[in-house]
Image (cartoon, rainbow, N blue to C red):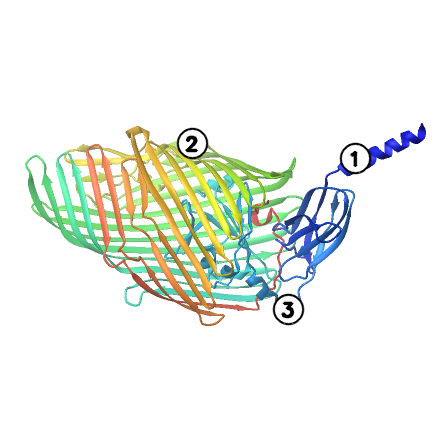
Amino acid sequence: MKRNILLFIVALFISDLCAQKLTLEGSVFDKKNNVIPYASIALLASDTITLITGTISDDQGRYQLKQLKPGNYFLSLSFMGYQSLIESINLVADKTISFTMEDEPYALDEVVVKANRSDVVKQSAMGQTFLLSGSALKKKDILDALQEIPSLSIDPNTRKITLNDGSNPLILVNGMRREGGLSAISAEDILSVDVVPTSSAEFMREGYTSVVNIKVKKSEQSYTSFNAGLDTHPLIRFGIADASLEWGNSKYSFYLSAQSFAFLDNKSDMTEVSKTVQSIRNATYKRNSDYSDTYFALGGDRSWSSSDYSSFSLMLNYVPQSNDGNGQTLITDIASNRTNKYAYTRTYDDRSWNGSANFYHTHRFDASALDLLLQINLNKNKNIANQLERGETDLITDFNFHNQRIGFSFAPSYQFEWLGFQSKIGLNSHFQSNEIVQRTKTKSAFKHKEWDEYAYVEMNRLWGNLSLAASVGVDLIFRDVEGYKNQYLGFRPVLNLGYKINSHHAFTLNYNMQLTAPDVVQLNPYNTSSDSLSMSTGNPYLKPYRMQQLKLSYTFTKKGFYVEPSVRYRRIDDDIVASGKEVEGVYIQSLANEGSCNGWSTALSFRYTIANMGFVGFNVAYNTISFPDISQKDHYLTGMVNLGLRYKKFNLSGSYGLPTNSYSMYKRSYSSPESMCKLSYEVSSNLDVSLGMRFILSNKQAERWTDMPGYSYYYDNQFTNRGNLVLIGVRYKLQNRKPSRSHEKLKNSDKGFRVIGE
């Protein structure tokens, strides 16, 4: 009997052991103890041939294999530039094993550059992590390389990065703000790019609803890099130039950067038609304008120890623009049908200076981190306009505004782990002071002060294939406008859910509510209309408006294909819209919180990567927007086709966009398609030359419509010399003592931004 009981217990033990589901996890390092992200991990049966399962190490070099049966296995590790490794594993319980891989004894950098990693798209609730293809990694310009990412759109005129939905993301490098200086980053040093379409509540107070984080490998030795480029029309004064210089080592980095875009002698044929109950005004004139946008930036960082890190960035932006117009105006009295003719002249001069400074420090504890961020902004603007319509009775419109703004914010935050959640709490105390001085006729000044106390909390966690990123911010705004004081309380909730079916299929659901305060231009009480039949002012007593957004998307990635259909719903309440009435023949309009709108968007993003040759892709969206207050509904398409192809020493890049439409209550605007094509040739490893064209097949056109009760307005700007612009370009890149091919560990809490985890 005792023997039978013993056999029964042993049988139960063996049965329980066989039924166990075990986990094998660990990290992958190189011989310098740096993590190796995106290494291939394969678990093989004891015959070393049969594949049981596999995975890829994450951006922190960690891997995890779940639901394994006890037994004997072989674990195979491989990554371009390292010797393959295979180890015998006897798995009888959950086990944590880390591995060290040896460098290959041949040209590592060449192997890495040729590797095609663009098939790897990691998905989580927070967003997506993209790896660049070998073709993109060879680009001399980082912005050319980033064009491969299907959810990004890059304007070649301004070199600004936006998302396909038009949102302006906060751009981070290794989780830190970097004002300018992107050009100094070498494309081949990019580890990956995080795209967060719905950002944490942490950044929403600043108006950022999305984030792009570029993760770059750090150097272990001294280095210097220089990158400069120029694209310009040989005859028309149109073009953009940029230059960046960076140097540093494993402890510090420092960069200087400058960029300037200019379009001088930009010629237009202008038409303006306005109508009130009593009159019709028709103005036609030729306009010649100058515009430029120049910025200078410098910054750097310093690793004081394994626990302390600091960085700073400074930026100065100068935007002068001016124009003059000459033509005629016809004003018709509707009742008598009498028309008066006026000689039209107008001069306009606007100059804007913007400066900003960011200072950041983080201190790491054993399992948490404390971050401190200080921001300072200084803005100044001078706006002068003189308009004369000379006729039977002269009509004179003069503006002379001088605006200045001072703002600063202090934002401490604390990151920690709580109940399995990666958590963060933070504050952002922000103050701004605005003053608009009107210097025409009787001098007067408008003053506005605002204090914003913002607190937020965020939590992130992964349960198997389900990921969660949730945050909420509480906003308390104190405003003083010309002695009129008020306060507003608002909430900014954000919820991101992600479910990864497998390595090729994933779903994400995003919700956020954004509270947007009016800017100082909308609060400005002075007349800014150049239409002699109307006056247009802001409203100092506007309150914030609320926007809610819900988005569901599905992502498929396999064998070079990236496909993402999505549907988005957006609602705006208490929107800021124009309202007005006619007084003694002049239409007086101002702004009020009287609008609401609903919008639906069905979109598709597509990209196909052709091995190491490059990519072709497009994004298109069908949009519906309705305004219940006026029973109006509009439909329109948006989208862009783009490509980037490489053959030997030739690179071909191009894009063509659908016309841009925008709608608000009573107003609509249209802008003709943006297009670009560029062929470049690699003269050497340091130098590229290119030939390109902007505004292909047609001249640029912009139109605006206003249709309010008792007033309508139409504006048409035909740019006569902004079509088929041929551009000659050159780009020079120099990197001295290229950083070694090592990957610094990017911890989740490093540098103020939580790197996306799978």
Q: Residues within 10 Å of mark 2 (few under 14, many from 20)?
A: few
Q: CA distance from mark 1 to mark 3?
A: 49 Å
Badge 1 is on which residue? 16
Position of 180 compared to 536: left or right?
A: right
| Rendered view: 221 above or below 718 | below
Q: Horizontal and vertical percent for residue 349?
A: 26, 54
Residue lying at the far top in this picture: please name it: 1
Question: Given this view, does label 2 or label 3 mark the residue nearer the observer?
Answer: 3
Q: Earlier in the sequence, mark 1 or mark 2?
A: 1
Determine whether label 1 and label 3 are within 8 Å by CB.
Answer: no
Q: Which is closer to the viewer, label 1 or label 2?
A: 1
> Could you say where residue 478 lies in the image, as x and y percent from the top left?
43, 34
Question: Which residue is outermost to the right?
Answer: 2
Mark 2–mark 3 distance (CA, rounded to whole Å): 63 Å
Q: CA distance from mark 1 to mark 2?
A: 61 Å
Corner quadrant of residue 159: bottom left
| Kind of residue at badge 3 | Tyr
Above or below 500: residue 158: below
Which residue corresponds to the image point at 52% horizontal and 39% vertical from the top-left? 507
Query: Residue 446, can we see it?
Result: no
Q: Is residue 540 visible?
A: yes
- Mark number for residue 661? none
Depth order, front residue of 502/490: 502
- Give the x, y percent position of residue 474: 49, 34
Q: Identify the residue at horizontal 75%, vertical 45% (top origin).
A: 95
- Amino acid type indicated by mark 1: Asp
Q: Is residue 703 left or right of residue 160?
A: left
- Which residue is denoted by mark 3 in the rendering? 106
Check residue 488 in the rendering and tell me which mark sits there, or answer none: 2
Element type where label 2 sits in the image: strand
The residue tagged with tag 3: helix, strand or loop? Answer: loop
The amino acid type found where label 2 is placed reads Tyr
